[in-house]
Amino acid sequence: MKPSILIIDDEPGICASLSLALEEEYDVRAATDADVGIRLLKEKPYHLVLLDLRIGGQDGIQVLKEIKSIDSSIAVIMMTAYGSIQSSVTAMKNGAFTYLSKPLDLEELFIFIKQALQFKHLNERVTYLSDELKSRYQYGEMVGKSPAMQNVYQIIEKVKDVDTSITISGESGTGKELAARAIHFLGRRKEEMFVDVNCAAIPEGLLEEEFFGHKRGSFTGAVSDKKGKFELADRGTLFLDEVGDMPLPLQGKLLRVLQQKQFSPIGSNEVKKVDVRVIAATNRNLREMVRKGTFRQDLFYRLNVVEIKLPPLHDRSQDIPLFVKYFIEKYNKALRKKITGITKEAENLLLSYHYPGNIRELANVLEYATILSDGITIDVRDLPAQMHGNNASQPAAPTPVFSEGMLAGFTLKELEKIAIKASLARNGGHQKNTAEQLGISERGLRNKIQEYALSDK
């Protein structure tokens, strides 16, 4: 089947001569009126359009925009007897493949038509493969082709456009926040705010203010009004990370807001109504906490209408090669390295490890290996010591021994970030132990975690 070309030019002679020149290789139609040309495009798809810059009294750039609004994949070659640099730039900015001046050189025209059609085909192929990869291996920012992750994607697809409260459960480091972001940014609330609150990182005395805000003068230091997370998330999504760490008194206040869909800022009698979709996440067993009386049963049932369980990494080992590729690309940029991949022996070792720290641990292992590798591939010798013993009870990543040469070129902030990540991994994400190991306060550690975006993803 011949590729189809539509010529839109107000000169009948041009249309006739181009049709005669092209008809042997292409299925050609012509229109001397822009409106007729647009109607033909709406009636059937064309591979390429040859478009005059001035069609009677109509501006060809505007016609180009309309063509692209009908089908952005159509290749368009602009033609004009009134060529200028400015009009050429404008045409290219609006999606034209190229820009040719009249009188046309037919040999040159044939070359550009073939290039435009090849480019269109390549773009369609890339788009198709990208869509295929996304549909099989990616949902939002989540990566995985394993059956366990495909099941997670299916649940998210069903709940993303409804306002049901959702609890995302899973071990630390399995990607709970990424799942919450996928629900929000792929759903009908995507144009509104996604507001996250780490219930474990905020001191108990400040959580209520964090949720509901305050009025100026309501307490010492309240020099101005402050909006709380609920108000900021109005019409959007409020993500409650580590909800199991929320103190019982605040659980009751949260429940009332979820039931009544209204609240009052601290120090104010004003009632604010809110429309907020709540997604909670936890690495703790909320059902067990309800049984022990450390988590309110009524709040549990309010939040846990739908539960999404994220599998640990050792249950989805076929996803590890995808993560390896992703993290190597990420750390190449961050660490100014040029790693191209890993050896088969290193890959086998990564596949056989248990990963008690899940995706976060794998990320730390690959960052460590990227730093230590002297070549363009990561080998077994570049992996942390505990990987070789395959002891799943060991912490995520040991404190690496760096030579002066390895440290050269890094800023103090970059080295501090690496040290904090390694210590968090070593302590299984336990902030108190990590702070003691680093010799800083828990508050200082929380500030650093926030500054370097090291929270559970």
Image (tube, grey):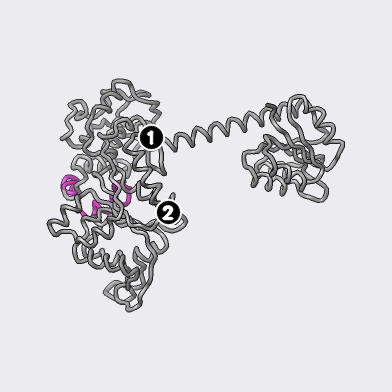
Please state the extent of the stretch shown in magenta in the rendering: 433-456
Would residue 179 be found to the left or right of residue 57 on screen?
left
What residue is disc 2 on?
161
**10 Å crowding of disc 2: few (<14), some (14-19), many (20+):** some
Quadrant where the N terminus is found in the figure: top right
Nearest the viewer among 20 and 43 is: 43
The amino acid on which the numbered mark 2 sits, given as a three-letter code, is Asp
From the top left corner, tell me how far across and down residue 22 is, in percent: 77, 28
Image location (x, y in percent) of residue 134: 44, 37
Please identify the quarter of the rendering in which residue 406 is found: top left
Q: Position of residue 415 (x, y in %)?
A: 29, 41
Circle 2 SS class: loop
> Above or below — where is 124 with respect to 170?
above
Which residue position holds label 1? 326
- Circle 1 SS class: helix
| Alpha carbon separation for disc pair 1 and 2 | 29 Å
Kindly identify the amino acid type of the residue bearing the numbered disc 1: Tyr
